[in-house]
Amino acid sequence: MTVTDGENKEDDLQGLTFICEALHDFKAEEENDLSFEQGELLTVTGLRSDGWWEAKNDEGATGLVPSTFFKIPDHIKSMLEGHLELENGRKLNSSIDSKSPFRKIISDESIDNLSITEETDISKPLMDQFSQLTVNQELLPEGFRSSILFEMQKSSFYNLGNFMAPKLDETGISFKDIHYEKTLLKPNATLLQKKINLIAVRQVPEPSNDFIVKSRHIRMCFHDGNKVLSNIHTVKAKWSKSTPKLWMFNSKITTKDSCTEDGEIFIKSNQCVPTLGILFELCMSYGDLKGTSGEMCAGWAFMKLLNDSGEPIKSKTNILKVQNTQPFTAYFFRKDSQGSSGFFKKIKDKQKLPRIVISICDPMIESL
């Protein structure tokens, strides 16, 4: 792409206005946000790099709205994807601006009673965090990148205990969901409750002989296309030296085994955003001939958990195509990481392309 082509793309986006339909209700979280309801038509008047757009409703009220809550027209989506490619190319050729004016995306409720020393890193959109990791990209083999979920998991914010521990109420002297009086006890409603079985990962690319792979594993979490919504869970894979591109997972473990070795995962969520899904990262811990060690990612996949009507998806076996693109942009999360349509194209995908085979179903009552 020439400089002129890039300038033309930017000119097309400057002053661009279009109408899009809301896929879900949104209640303003901050002073500059704009509330809307499902099915409402809003006019987008300005685009921002953090995924929050400037919009106006029929009554003339203006404010910021999350782009992942809207059905974007196809011709607009193609323009945005072209603009993203241009911006990504510029990021790789320029230094990283640590003062980018991104809107905070961590709500007050999610950080109650937590001591977060890296709040600025946690509150940034994942796209910005990825750009910071590209500075070490030259140390990794071609086709691999640094794992964002690995870096995020170092923070206590994304540990399971943070999401499972009781939270204090507004007074700060008692808990929200723990009561001494039995009359006040009530079950917490869960909007989504599923069981996921990791079956296999096929055709995973292998690094060069300069890198010694110590462990292969999948990192996974709830994601809405813009930010991580849950703890980050890790499941170790099994493989053999004769077939390193095939990862398998334990379907049955004993009480002595760690939960990281169990390919059966229970998921629960009270989030109801239309783009809710599970983000998977294929990760490898490695060492090289220079004595350097670390973790790299061989690709990612995304599986939506809600259908177009906002209901949980039905039980089925999924084959998710592993993406090797720059991850965590809102536009890649519009749909599942499914393979190409068409009979012969599906056969080609199945034979040559990396993919994750998983099953999802409703858990049995005795398992809960």
Image: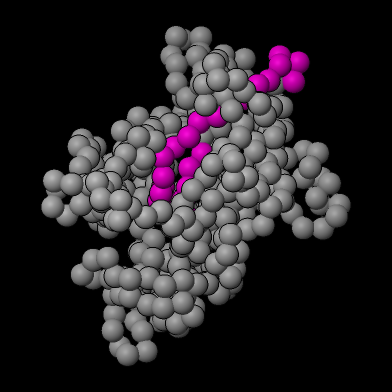
Q: Is residue 195 left or right of residue 63?
A: right
The part of the image, by quadrant, that contains residue 43 is bottom left
Quadrant in the picture for the N terminus:
bottom right
Residue 157's x, y, as percent? Answer: 31, 38
* Count of numbered tags: 0
Q: Determine the residue positioned at 46% across, 62% down.
A: 273
Q: Between residues 170 and 338, which one lies in front from this camera angle?
A: 170
- Residue 250 is situated, as x and y percent measured from the top left of the image, at 65, 26
Left or right: 241, with 365 as reference point? right
Bounds of the magenta segment: 220-243
- Colour option used: one colour
Whether residue 316 is visible: yes
Quarter placement of the C terminus = top right
Query: Which residue is located at x 39 percent, y 61 percent?
Result: 51
Quarter-of-image position of residue 300: top right
Magenta-colored stretch includes residue 314: no
- Relative to residue 88, is residue 31 depicted above or below? below
The location of residue 111, given as percent across then percent down, is 25, 46
Q: Farthest residue toward the front?
A: 182
Confirm whether residue 1 shows in the render: no
What is the x, y in percent for residue 54?
Answer: 33, 73
Q: Say above or below: 24 vs 315.
A: below
Along the line of sight, which residue is nearer the eye, 205 or 289? 205
Taking the magenta stretch, the answer to whether it contains residue 238 is yes
